[in-house]
Image (tube, grey):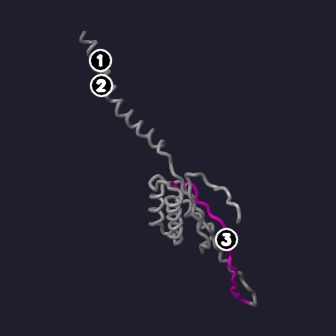
Amino acid sequence: MGKPSRERSLSDKEARAITKNLRVSPQKLNLVAGLIRGKKVDQALADLEFSRKRIAQDVRKCVMSAVANAENNHQLDVNALIVSEAYVGKNLVMKRFAARGRGRGFSIMKPFSQITVVVRETEAEAEKPKAAKGAAKKAAPAAKASKKSAAAEKEAE
């Protein structure tokens, strides 16, 4: 027996990775998450590799984990993945105390956060119309040349 399995919350073309207990405030982590939202995976990994933010390396590990989940668990094409979602959540807060003058105390909050990265496989059909537009541009000069030759033939008659 055991618990019944629950339905998958993501679609068949998506994979997810979650990194918890990152020692950075959610506000700072959200700056890095905003850097990669909506980008292709290879571009997002390159941006994180050269980011000056300390937490970017942990976010990079999370993106790589999501890509590995997509490839191994869901058989998705790694070259067609984009970072569809990257959202940040609060986690625990360590409360510390600093002594101040005249017997007072000052509280220090050390927040932790978590990041969830969802990668999605893009459809191959989305890239085909781009190729069709390029073919139409190449065909346009040939059509103009044929119109000119047709006009020249009419004048010759």
Residue 50 percent location from the top left of the image:
44, 66
Residue 32 percent location from the top left of the image:
55, 64
Residue at 29% in and 17% down: 150
| Mark 3–mark 1 distance (CA, rounded to whole Å) | 73 Å
**Residue lying furthest front in this view?**
1
Residue 60 relative to residue 144: left or right: right
Which structural element holds mark 3? strand
Q: Residues within 10 Å of mark 2 (few under 14, many from 20)?
A: few
Q: Quadrant of residue 100?
A: bottom right
The residue under label 3 is 91
Q: Quadrant of residue 155?
A: top left
**Residue 145 tag number:** 2
**Which residues fall within the magenta stretch?**
82-101
**Numbered circles on residues, count:** 3
Residue at 57% in and 63% down: 17
Relative height, residue 81 to residue 116 (above, below): above
| Mark 1–mark 2 distance (CA, rounded to whole Å) | 9 Å
Relative height, residue 5 to residue 141 (above, below): below
- Look at discs 3 and 1 and give the one toward the viewer: 3
Relative height, residue 120 to residue 33 (above, below): above
Residue type (three-letter) at the residue carrying disc 1 = Ala
Residue type (three-letter) at the residue carrying disc 2 = Ala
Q: Is residue 54 covered in magenta? A: no
Residue 139 percent location from the top left of the image:
35, 31
First in sequence: mark 1 or mark 2?
Answer: 2
**Residue lying furthest top in this view?**
157
> Is the N terminus in the top left, top right, bottom left or bottom right quadrant?
bottom right
- In this view, the residue in front, 98 or 138, is 138
The residue under label 1 is 150
First in sequence: mark 3 or mark 1?
Answer: 3
- Look at discs 2 and 3 and give the one toward the viewer: 3
Residue at 71% in and 81% down: 107
